[in-house]
Image: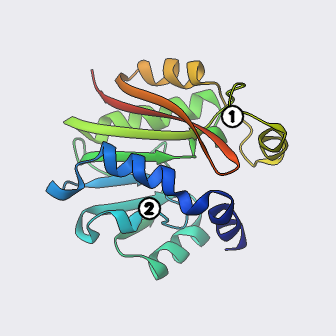
Amino acid sequence: MLFSWLRKIMELNFSKQKKIIKETFDLKSGGKILDIGCGTGEFAGLFSQADYYGIDISAQYIQYAAKNNKGSFKVMEATKLGFPDDSFDYILIMAMLHHLNDGDAKRVLSEAKRVLRPEGKILIIEDAKIEKLENSIDKFIQRYDKGAFIRTPDQYRNMAADFFLVNFEQSFRSGCFVYYSLVLKNN
């Protein structure tokens, strides 16, 4: 997975994202985690193997993730989650929504709401258009990113607010990339 390796270098081993995940989720007390759009399973190692479920639409990514990480990995569409209601304490959506149009992104959030337990938390971290943080490298990378729907923080916030309460938000840089993150709870 050359792309994953390059992204890891360009993002300084995702250290900022990993720090945010650890600060957001109470990993010491356990709890079931669903990683929607887990890709190659980069963040699986942060969680207990027994409690981690990663899904992605790419069979190639899931095969790689299952071979190189611990946890449960399945090929699955994020708009039609194959889990019962109230299944997860935590949901992670990392750099996935910018690949989806508004309708599909809202279906993902609706499904996430359905499978999240009443007291659960969602962390969304997405590539974002944030002019004050961008530079020429960001703009170049975003132009060639496979995700055609990189949004502004306002657009992500408004979309999420249709389903959840926004508990915390922040914008940040990770290596060559600009991100916006939201911590959400059931409303």
Q: Nearer the viewer, residue 18 or 187?
A: 18
Q: Which mark is on residue 150?
A: 1
Q: Is residue 59 above or below residue 80?
A: below
Tell me the CA gap for discs 2 and 1: 22 Å
**Nearer-the-camera pick, 172 or 60:** 172
Contact (Cβ within 8 Å) of mark 2 with mark 1: no
Q: Quadrant of residue 153?
A: top right
Place of residue 89 in the rendered image (x, y in percent of width and height, measured from the top left): 23, 46
Residue at image coords 57%, 46%: 95
Q: Disc 2 marks which residue? A: 43
Q: Residues within 10 Å of mark 2 (few under 14, many from 20)?
A: some
Tag 1's secondary structure?
A: loop
Question: What crowding class fits label 1: few (fewer than 14 Cα within 10 Å), some (14-19), or many (20 or more)?
Answer: many
**Residue at (50, 50) in percent of width and height:** 16
Specify whether residue 90 is in view.
yes
As helix, strand or loop, the secondary structure at mark 2 comes to: loop
Instruction: Say which amino acid is labelled 2.
Output: Phe
What colour scheme does the image use?
A: rainbow
Q: Residue at x 71, y 44 (%)?
A: 147
Left or right side of 77 for 179 = right
Q: Nearer the viewer, residue 143 or 147?
A: 143
Query: Horizontal and vertical percent for residue 38?
Result: 49, 58
Quadrant location of the N terminus? bottom right
Residue at the left extreme of this rendering: 29
Please indicate whether residue 108 sits to the left or right of residue 165 in the image.
Answer: right
- Percent x, y for residue 154? 57, 18
Earlier sequence position, callout 2 versus callout 1: 2
Q: Quadrant of residue 32?
A: bottom left
- Label tally: 2
In the image, residue 5 sits, relative to residue 139, either above or below, namely: below
